[in-house]
Image (cartoon, rainbow, N blue to C red):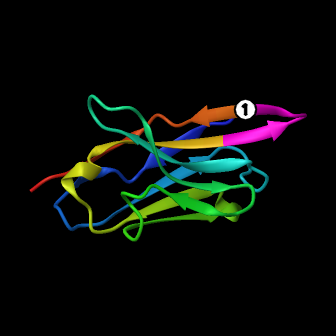
Amino acid sequence: QVQLVESGGGLVQPGGSLRLSCAASGSIFNVNAIGWYRQAPGKQRELVAAITSALATNYADSVKGRFTMSRDNAKNTVYLQMNSLKPEDTAVYYCYAQWITFRTAYDYWGQGTQVTVSS
């Protein structure tokens, strides 16, 4: 069983920055996919950014140019650098990871961290 623990959320003013971290209890070297989702009140959970097994990073159109996802395999940690934050970025941000073992996919989620963008 893998645990994902997010940190770095908080309250920030519009135009500000935050960096989220997601630490995995297991190795992320061979992860099939790992990324960030968010869920705002009354809305569905949506993909923010993800790194696939092909090492490509995909971003939601709404965050392109403002958010950057990175990974540190040695620390089993991924990061989400969020710049130029907007009130519409307010949401609970969840870390997600998927490993595939013997052709079976195992999905894991963190507990979420609140990001609030407000003046």
State the residue lying farthest toward the front: 61
Q: Which residues are magenta?
A: 98-105
Q: x and y percent of residue 115 in the render?
A: 29, 48
Q: x and y percent of residue 49 in the render?
A: 51, 55
* Residue 94 falls within the magenta-colored stretch: no
State the residue lying farthest toward the bottom: 65
Q: x and y percent of residue 31 in the render?
A: 74, 49
Q: Is residue 7 left or right of residue 77?
A: left
Q: Is residue 108 left or right of residue 1?
A: left
> Which residue is identified by label 1?
106
The quarter holding residue 63 reads: bottom left
Residue at (22% x, 58% y) in the render: 86
Give neighbour class at mark 1: few <14, some 14-19, many 20+ (Cα, 10 Å): few
The quadrant of the picture occupied by the C terminus is bottom left
Instruction: Tell me the element at label 1.
Output: strand
Dominant SS in magenta: strand
Residue at (56% x, 50% y) in the render: 35
The quarter holding residue 41 reads: top left
Residue at (16% x, 60% y) in the render: 13
The quadrant of the picture occupied by the N terminus is top right
Q: Is residue 73 above or below residue 36?
A: below
Q: x and y percent of residue 17 in the render?
A: 29, 66
State the residue lying farthest toward the right: 102
Q: Is residue 84 above or below residue 45?
A: below
Q: Is residue 14 left or right of residue 17?
A: left
Q: Is residue 72 above or below residue 115?
A: below
* Residue 103 falls within the magenta-colored stretch: yes
Q: Nearer the viewer, residue 11 or 36?
A: 36
Residue at (34% x, 50% y) in the render: 9
Mark 1 residue type? Tyr
Number of labels in the image equals 1
